């Protein structure tokens, strides 16, 4: 069966691809790691922990937020970020299901 457009895929497949795309840059992985180590939302500290400019970090934060992995709240002139725990739990379940696939049961050898 050929897939012609995004709507032909299952919801979990679309979400997995969106999350994978959001995590496809090392800076975004570093941001997720940094945020996961914090006890509260972080406003300006993220830029100080990465070898990137403020504008570049902001773009990466936007991608992570669009994928639902983090959330941001406006606090005066700044935005404070933290992990979106509910969406992170969903992402974890999607990828656990994906990586549970059992390829040992394949009847034929390949490659």
Image: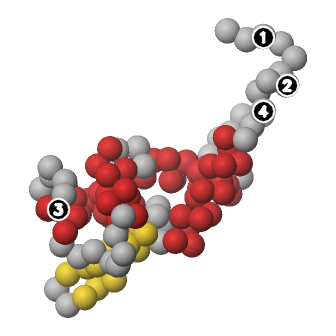
Per the image, the residue denoted by label 1 is: 109
* Callouts 2 and 3 close, C-beta under 8 Å: no
Secondary structure of residue under mark 1 = loop
Q: If you read the primary sequence from the N terminus, does the residue marked by circle 2 or circle 3 appear first? A: 3
What is the distance, in whole Å, between disc 4 and disc 3 at their CAs?
A: 41 Å
Tell me the quarter of the picture where residue 3 sits.
Answer: top right
Per the image, the residue denoted by label 4 is: 102
* Callouts 4 and 1 close, C-beta under 8 Å: no
Which quadrant, please, contains the C terminus? top right
Q: If you read the primary sequence from the N terminus, does the residue marked by circle 4 or circle 1 appear first? A: 4
Drawn side of residue 37 relative to residue 90, left or right: left
* Callouts 2 and 4 close, C-beta under 8 Å: yes
What is the distance, in whole Å, between disc 4 and disc 1 at their CAs?
A: 14 Å
Please name the colour scheme applied to the rendered image. secondary structure
Drawn side of residue 61 relative to residue 19, left or right: left
Asked whether residue 97 appears in the rendered view, the answer is: yes
Which quadrant, please, contains the N terminus? top right
As displayed, is residue 50 above or below residue 45?
above
Tell me the quarter of the picture where residue 25 sits.
Answer: top left
| Rendered image: mark on residue 47 | 3
Drawn side of residue 88 relative to residue 26, left or right: right
Residue 45: x %, y % from top left: 19, 69
Q: Nearer the viewer, residue 109 or 40?
A: 40
Secondary structure of residue under mark 3 = helix
Asked whether residue 9 appears in the rendered view, the answer is: no
What is the distance, in whole Å, between disc 2 and disc 3 at their CAs?
A: 47 Å
Q: Nearer the viewer, residue 44 or 76?
A: 44
Q: If you read the primary sequence from the N terminus, does the residue marked by circle 4 or circle 3 appear first? A: 3
Q: Residue furthest bottom?
A: 76
| Rendered image: mark on residue 105 | 2
Residue 86: x %, y % from top left: 57, 72
Residue 78: x %, y % from top left: 20, 81
């Amino acid at each position: 069966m050929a897939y012609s457009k995004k709507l032909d895929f299952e919801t979990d497949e679309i979400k997995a691809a969106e999350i994978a795309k959001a995590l496809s840059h090392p800076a975004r992985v570093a941001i997720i790691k940094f945020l996961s180590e914090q006890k509260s939302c972080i406003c300006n500290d993220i830029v100080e922990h990465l070898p990137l400019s403020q504008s570049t970090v902001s773009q990466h934060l936007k991608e992570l937020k669009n994928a639902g992995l983090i959330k941001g709240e406006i606090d005066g002139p700044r935005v404070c970020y933290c992990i979106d725990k509910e969406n992170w739990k969903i992402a974890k379940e999607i990828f656990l299901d994906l990586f549970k696939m059992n390829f040992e049961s394949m009847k034929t050898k390949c490659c």
